[in-house]
Amino acid sequence: MDTLIEISTASPSDAGIISRIAERSIRVGCAVEHRNDPRIVAAWTRNSALSQIQPWLVDPRLRLTLARLQGRPVGTAMASVNGRIAFCYVQPEWFRRGAGQALVRDIEAWLQARGVVQVRLNSTRTSHAFYRHLGFEQSAEAFAIGGVMAIAMHKPLIDPAGNVRPEGKSLPR
């Protein structure tokens, strides 16, 4: 893992960077999922258009972040105050360098500070192992959404006694 991962709250001037990271991550990093089907790719990348991203950047119910490695923007993530991670995208050439993990940990801390007790997301098959590594568990059978298989996952942010869970630790089973 790179030690110089910097996570920051995205600003309105970052909309273009976020759009490019998301689109490239979808087109290249998720190719196994969408099999380069133009309809599926178009549906996925529609949400990474500037017109979609700009309102998110000023919505106080959302946390939209950027990860930088060696000063370069390499990843982005977004979550809402209801405890749902909407996305976590990392540029494919920066996979497995810690940016995704840092983005998710930042989102979890933001949610915990707002009293959220459980975080939820829909994972692709490709990302499933990544999220399991971070302590997420599958919540339901995989299902199709937009031509891609999705896996509902969740992770408690507090332990059964109501204490904030230590970062990165799974709860006892």
Image (cartoon, helix red, strand yellow):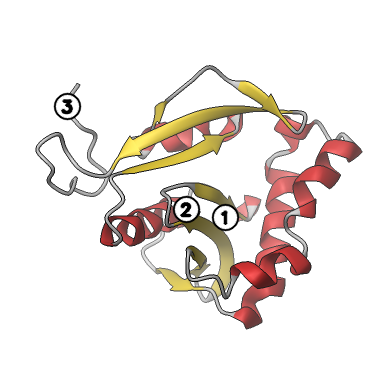
Q: Disc 3 on helix, strand or loop?
A: loop
Q: Do the residues labelled 2 and 1 touch (CB within 8 Å)?
A: yes
Q: In which quarter of the image is residue 10?
A: bottom right
Residue picked out by circle 1: 94
At horizontal 77% and vertical 62% (from top left) the residue drawn is 49
For label 2, the SS is loop
Q: Is residue 9 in view?
A: yes
Circle 2 sits on which residue?
97
**Foreground: disc 3 or disc 1:** 3
Q: If you read the primary sequence from the N terminus, does the residue marked by circle 3 or circle 1 appear first?
A: 1
Q: How far apart are marks 2 and 1 (CA)?
A: 6 Å
Residue 15, position as x, y percentages in the image: 67, 73
Please give the label number shown on residue 172.
3
User: Between marks 2 and 3, how big is the CA–CA gap?
Assistant: 28 Å
Q: Which residue lies furthest to the left in this view?
A: 161
Work out which quarter of the rendered image holds the C terminus and state it.
top left
Vertical comparison of 46 with 55: above or below: above
Q: Which of the 4 image quadrants contains residue 112?
A: bottom left
Question: What residue type is disc 1 on?
Answer: Trp
Which amino acid, mark 2? Arg
Q: How crowded is mark 3: few (under 14 residues within 10 Å), some or many (20 or more)?
A: few
Left or right placement of residue 146 versus residue 75 in this view: right
Image location (x, y in percent) of residue 100: 48, 52
- Residue 64: horizontal and vertical position, in percent? 52, 65
N-term-proximal mark, 2 vs 3: 2
What label sits on residue 75 in the rendered view? none
- Between 162 and 94, the residue placed more toward the observer is 162
- The answer to whether 32 appears left or right of 3 in the picture is right
Where 109 sits versus 71, above or below? Answer: above
Query: Furthest residue to the bottom?
Result: 13
The reply to whether the C-beta atoms of the residues labelled 3 and 1 are less than 8 Å apart is no
